[in-house]
């Protein structure tokens, strides 16, 4: 089993910054991708940023230039630095990872429990 534990959400004013963290633990052989999704009230869950074990990250157009995803592969941790936050960024942010627990099997997808980010005056 693999667990993803997120931290760093909260209330911030427009224009402010927050940093989310997500640490993976458990029976991990390797992690293929780690990323962040978000779900605002009444909307579908959407990709925010994604980072494979190597190569450049992918970002949603709405966050390009404001958010930065990074990984510490040695710690099985992914971060999301969010700057210039807008009210439209308000959502529950979920950590996502595709984890290889057995090298003879394909990666399995795991989700964190979610952390709420509220951008408001």
Image (spheres, rainbow, N blue to C red):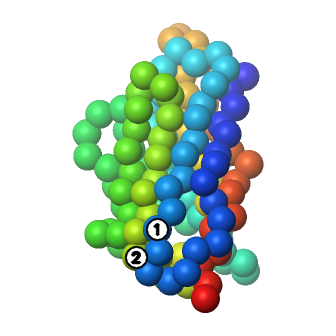
Q: For residue 42, which quarter of the picture?
A: bottom right
Q: Is residue 105 visible?
A: no
Q: Position of residue 19 (x, y in %)?
A: 50, 56
Q: For residue 92, which quarter of the picture?
A: bottom right
Which labelled disc corresponds to residue 93?
Answer: none
Report whether 31 appears left or right of 57: right
Which residue shows up at 44% across the image and 64% down it? 82
Q: For residue 89, which quarter of the picture?
A: bottom right
Disc 1 marks which residue?
17
Check disc 2: other Cα within 10 Å, few if <14, some if 14-19, many if 20+.
Answer: some
> Is residue 7 positioned above or below 71 on the image?
below
Which residue shows up at 70% across the image and 54% down it? 114
Disc 2 marks which residue?
84
Check disc 1: other Cα within 10 Å, few if <14, some if 14-19, many if 20+.
Answer: some
- Whether pointer 1 and pointer 2 mark residues with C-beta atoms closer than 8 Å, the reply is yes
Q: Position of residue 7 (x, y in %)?
A: 64, 48
């Amino acid at each position: 089993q693999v667990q993803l534990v997120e931290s760093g959400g909260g209330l911030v004013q427009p224009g402010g910054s927050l940093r989310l963290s997500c640490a993976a633990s458990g029976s991990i052989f390797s992690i293929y991708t780690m990323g962040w999704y978000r779900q605002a009230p009444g909307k579908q869950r959407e990709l925010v940023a994604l980072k494979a074990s190597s190569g450049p990250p992918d970002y949603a157009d709405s966050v390009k230039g404001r958010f930065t995803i990074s990984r510490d592969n040695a710690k099985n941790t992914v971060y999301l630095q969010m700057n210039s936050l807008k009210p439209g960024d308000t959502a529950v942010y979920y950590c996502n990872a595709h984890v290889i627990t057995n090298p003879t099997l394909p990666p399995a997808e795991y989700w964190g429990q979610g952390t709420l980010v509220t951008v408001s005056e």
